[in-house]
Image: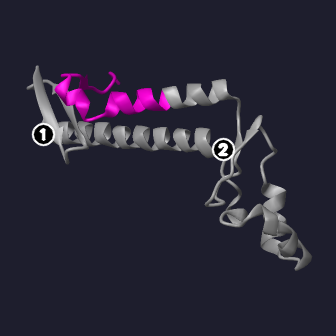
Amino acid sequence: MVLLHFKKSDANQFLYETTTAITIDKLVEELVTVNNMRLHVDRAAQAMEELAAKGPLKPEALRGLDEAGYEEYLKAEDLTVTNGLKDMPPQVGVREVKDESHYRTGWLVSEEMTQKMLDHATEMKRVISAKACLEKRNMSLPPM
């Protein structure tokens, strides 16, 4: 077995265990797959944190618009806002938080569920963090 230290930057690095019998082409393919999976997991963790903090995204047509201004758009018969309000997800959650960017609805689920989401996001980030190299935790692909 061989242990490789893949390091693209200080924040993007991991240990990968492989064999000496693997071809270079296959090794590069596996390293790219593992790195891409790490990036996907990181983006998913960030999205989960945003969902827990500010609620679900608004429909594309309503992002960036203040909720207080919806009436003005409806009076002007703005089709984009009218159609966007039809696509608005049903209000869920028990708490409401103001989103300054008006990109998310601000509807939050219970504190318990929010904490679970944040805990899972933290665990996901811990697994893929660069500190895993210092802890000698290696990444590997599941057998296919």
The one of 37 and 137 positioned closer to us in this rendering: 137
Determine which of the numbered discs, if any, sits on residue 63 in the image. Answer: none
Horizontal side of residue 79 vs 128, given as left or right: right
Mark 2 neighbour class, 10 Å CA radius: few under 14, some 14 to 19, many 20 or more? many
Residue at 18 percent across and 36 percent down: it is 27
Examine the rendered structure and indicate whether residue 22 appears above or below residue 88.
Answer: above
**Helix, strand or loop status at disc 1:** helix
Examine the structure image and report whether residue 122 is included in the region drawn in magenta.
yes
Examine the rendered structure and indicate whether residue 64 appears above or below residue 55.
Answer: below
Amino acid type, mark 1: Ile
Residue 44 place in picture, x, y as percent: 48, 40
**Direction bottom: furthest residue:** 76
Nearer the observer: mark 1 or 2; the answer is 2
Specify the segment rendered in magenta.
Answer: 120-144
Horizontal side of residue 59 vs 15, given as left or right: right
Picture quadrant of residue 42:
top left
Looking at the rendered structure, the number of numbered marks drawn on it comes to 2
Examine the structure image and report whether residue 93 is included in the region drawn in magenta.
no
Mark 1–mark 2 distance (CA, rounded to whole Å): 45 Å
Label 1, on which residue?
24
- First-in-chain label (1 vs 2): 1
Residue 34 place in picture, x, y as percent: 30, 36
Residue at 44 percent across and 30 percent down: it is 122
**Helix, strand or loop status at disc 2:** loop
Does residue 20 appear in the picture of this structure? Answer: yes
Residue at 71 percent across and 51 percent down: it is 105
Residue 31 place in picture, x, y as percent: 23, 38
Does residue 22 appear in the picture of this structure? Answer: no
Examine the rendered structure and indicate whether residue 21 appears above or below residue 23.
Answer: above
Label 2, on which residue?
55
Residue 43 place in picture, x, y as percent: 45, 44
